[in-house]
Amino acid sequence: MTEPTDDEAHDEAHGGALGSRLNWLRAAVLGANDGIVSTAGLVVGVAGATDDRAALLTAGLAGLLAGSMSMAAGEYVSVSTQRDSEKAALAAEKRELRERPEAELAELAQLLEERGLSSQVAREAAEQLTARDALRAHARVELGIDPDELTDPWHAAWASFLAFTAGALLPLLAIVLPPPDWRVPVTVVSVLASLVLTGWSSARLGAARPGRAVVRNVAGGALAMGVTYAVGTLLGAAGV
């Protein structure tokens, strides 16, 4: 059996890195989308009750900060839990490799065989991978983990914070900058246009058809703004 060439190894590493980058981009797009929809719903609802610029700015900033901090905290906790689980799995695998190396070698060969290699080739591949780096081989083949690419929870938290903030700034600026009579129309048009972009981007990054994703995204955002504006208008009319 021939060992993988340097070019093949590079392609495999490049493919893994590309997949990781696409996941980060998709998360950033979805974070920005959340910022757009949640902040737009908030400021449009307040605009239904009052046209006071200070009240709109205060509500928008409060929503932006609360949402971005919540997203960051949630992402940090989620990724930290995932990272802890991955570390525990790697530690258990390292212990098993130390205590029963032959059984782990046979297990790796079986996993490779299940992926389409013949018994002999799978055994040879398992032996070569084990000789090179047993833990890394088992981590990738058995656990689906790359020990060199464990996600940093702080990076994930900052990425979520920045993505949400970037998305939330659009409806916030759209509601406070125009004259009073233009605030809601400008915000609605700006938000719907941006939701078309984020819906299309998320679909393309996920290798899906963008049509349905765009429609769902725009419909959800329009519904959120419509409901909050109606509630705000009713509360404003009631003097609440």
Image: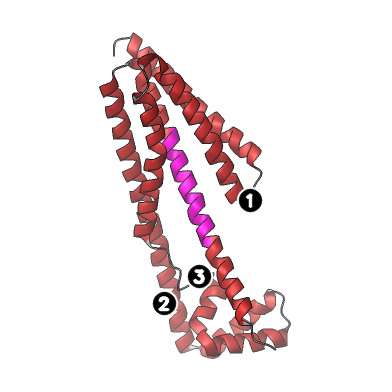
Q: Please tell me which residue lies in front, 35 or 94.
A: 35
- The residue beneath circle 2 is 91
Residue flagged by tag 2: what amino acid is it? Ala
Q: Residues within 10 Å of mark 3 (few under 14, many from 20)?
A: some
Q: Are marks 2 and 3 in contact (CB under 8 Å)?
A: no
Range covered by the magenta-colored residues: 20-37
**Label 3 or label 1, whichever comes before in sequence order:** 3
Quarter location, residue 43: top left
Q: Nearer the viewer, mark 1 or mark 2?
A: 1
- Residue drawn at point x = 39 percent, y = 49 percent: 160
- Residue drawn at point x = 36 percent, y = 47 percent: 161
Q: Position of residue 25 (x, y in %)?
A: 50, 52
Residues at marks 3 and 1, CA–CA distance in whole angstroms: 23 Å
Q: Position of residue 127 (x, y in %)?
A: 60, 89
Q: Position of residue 188 (x, y in %)?
A: 47, 24
- The residue beneath circle 3 is 145
- The residue beneath circle 1 is 207
